[in-house]
Amino acid sequence: MRLGEAFTRGFCEDGTNHHKQGYPMQRFEGKVALITGAGSGIGQATAIRLASEGARVWCVDINPAGVESTVHTVTASGGEARAHACDVSDEAAIKACVQACVDAFGRLDVVCNMAGILRFDHAHELTVANWQKVMDINLTGTFLMCREALPHLLDTKGNIVNAASTASLSGLPWGAAYSASKGGVLAMTRSIAVEYAKRGVRANCICPGDIATNMASNVTFPEGADLALLGRVMSLTGMKGPEVVAGVIAMLASDDGIHITGEDIRMDGGMLS
């Protein structure tokens, strides 16, 4: 077995377990992570990744079946996870969610806000109701979770990783609502990072692009959309799975990212290069 293979599998050449020796693959041992959107896509991949590195994970999603599936995957691999069905746009539900997590696990160290929705509309046809729904979930939901989690993160000197998007950095055709919501997430995250830096809490954003998720695959384009514009949202290296994003989130949320706050990390295969 090669050394790189041994490290990936968590064992030295002599058969001892890296995880039990405190190597980086156990970066979340003793920590609790709350992850929204954990029923599928990037949220699910993040829950599985952080649990594999020792975190106890509180898996949050509006889809009970999806989040239970994630918990089953984690626990079947020897990790610890709990499922919590929650609509992130519901203020009372968010309050109850965070409190339930702390009651169950006794602390909160990491919050990963991955819940979101994507829709495409011609800007001149976008209704206020559809605009508001995107804002309520992507932006307000992220804010509410950050607000409720911050008192606990101050106790543990924890951190936040929020899902922005390449749409917060560059124009997305037919994405007026989505882009505005993700731009808001990015700006809000930077504000939180500055406000809480001296109190020991970090906040960062990921900006994925061209990632294979249910959210991306289930959208419909408005009538008359110029599909040639889709070239603007395609990576140079091909679409990748959500696990590549989860790896970056794990770095940011761990002590490997201790000197990173207020940052947005773009993972788009060179799309915006």
Image: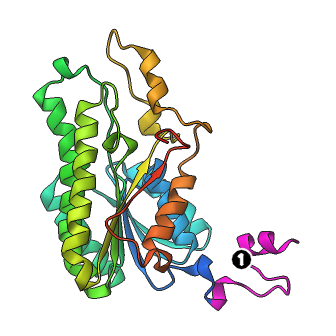
Judged left or right of residue 233, residue 149 is left
Furthest toward the right, the residue is 1
Q: Residue pushed farthest front?
A: 273
Is residue 87 in sight in this rendering? no
Up-down: is 62 above or below 52? Answer: above
Whether 18 is among the magenta residues is: yes
Quarter-wise, where is residue 132 in the image? Answer: top left
Within the magenta stretch, is there residue 10? yes
Please indicate, yes or no, whether residue 272 appears anywhere in the rendered image. Answer: yes
**Residue flagged by tag 1: what amino acid is it?**
Gly
Q: Is residue 184 above or below residue 252?
A: above
The segment highlighted magenta reads: 1-21
Q: Looking at the figure, which quarter contains the N terminus?
A: bottom right
Q: Residue at x 79, y 69 (%)?
A: 5
Image position of 30 with respect to 100: above or below: below
Q: Which residue is mark 1?
A: 10
Query: Mark 1 falls on what kind of element?
Result: loop
Residue neighbourhood size for the residue with mark 1, other residues' Cα within 10 Å, grouped as few (<14), some (14–19), many (≥20): some
Give left or right: position of 68 versus 109.
Answer: right
Residue 58 located left or right of residue 3: left
Residue at x 34% of width, y 74% of height: 159
User: Residue extending furthest bottom?
Assistant: 21
- Residue 39 % position (x, y): 43, 52
Residue 143 spot, x, y in % from top left? 19, 59
Measured from the top left, where is residue 31 in percent x and y? Answer: 43, 81
Q: Is residue 132 left or right of residue 163?
A: left
Residue 135, horizontal then vertical, whole percent: 19, 43
State the residue in front, 259 or 98.
259
